[in-house]
Image (spheres, helix red, strand yellow):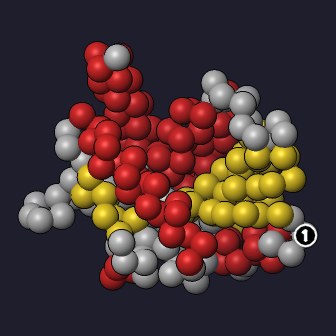
Amino acid sequence: DRKRAEAAIRESEARYRTVHQELLYTHTGQSRSRNSPQRLKARDNLAAQLGRLGLTVTLEPFQYRGTLHNLVAEKRGVFRPADIYVVGAHLDSANDNCPGADDDASGLAALLEIATALQPFACAATIRFVVFDAEEDQMQGSLAYAAVHAQHERILGMITLEDMAYNPPGATHDVVKVATLSDPHDAPLLAALIDAFNARGFGRGVGADADQENGADSL
């Protein structure tokens, strides 16, 4: 009912805020840059939280100015485990002076919240949550991941959670922008996501629209 839905939304928002502010080092003076030890602490915090949800958590090494790791947490599908959908966000912030609260702690906290929301449910296909490192270095982590997995696995789709927290006043306030790569196969998913946002409103009239500036199909 409506009261339960509103209570669930409040609980989700509080959980997101705690993860974003306390586990991902987003306060002034903090950073998840390559040179900051807080980057690995944030990764370990995420790994612990994803493990508590019963997901299979691994670190996948790749080489870029030394050995770095992508964090992978998998919820194996019940009926079609070889069919894989990826939910991704990136660990690193832009530089030593940037806490990266929007880019991309907002996406990391959302990734964990999605995993939490799905925890009680069995999924037909496999859902793989990936925290990429070295995104600010020309997407080295995601390129390394794709080089290993894209040719040998049946990855059917991906949702990237990027820069989700910036919410300036004006015409686009409380409007989530959903972008695709203009692939016609993405159009049904894009439409479904936007319809879901606009139907629920998330208790505060939050809506969604296609992000045409960043490559979304026009709806």
Image check: 105 left or right of 68?
left
The percent position of residue 16, horizontal first and vertical second, equals 40, 37
The percent position of residue 208, horizontal first and vertical second, equals 31, 58
Residue drawn 29% across the image and 16% down it: 3
Disc 1 residue type (three-letter): His
Tag 1 residue: 152
The percent position of residue 120, horizontal first and vertical second, equals 63, 24
Which residue is at the front of the view, 62 or 5?
5
Residue drawn 46% across the image and 55% down it: 192
Image check: 147 left or right of 7?
right
- Secondary element under disc 1, as helix, strand or loop, is loop
| Number of numbered discs visible in the structure rendering | 1
Q: Is residue 18 visible?
A: no
The percent position of residue 18, horizontal first and vertical second, equals 39, 34
Which residue is at the front of the view, 60 or 173?
173
Among all residues in the image, which is located at the extreme right? 152
Q: Residues within 10 Å of mark 1 (few under 14, many from 20)?
A: few
Image check: 127 left or right of 152?
left
Q: Is residue 19 visible?
A: yes
Determine which quarter of the picture holds residue 6.
top left
Residue drawn 76% across the image and 46% down it: 125
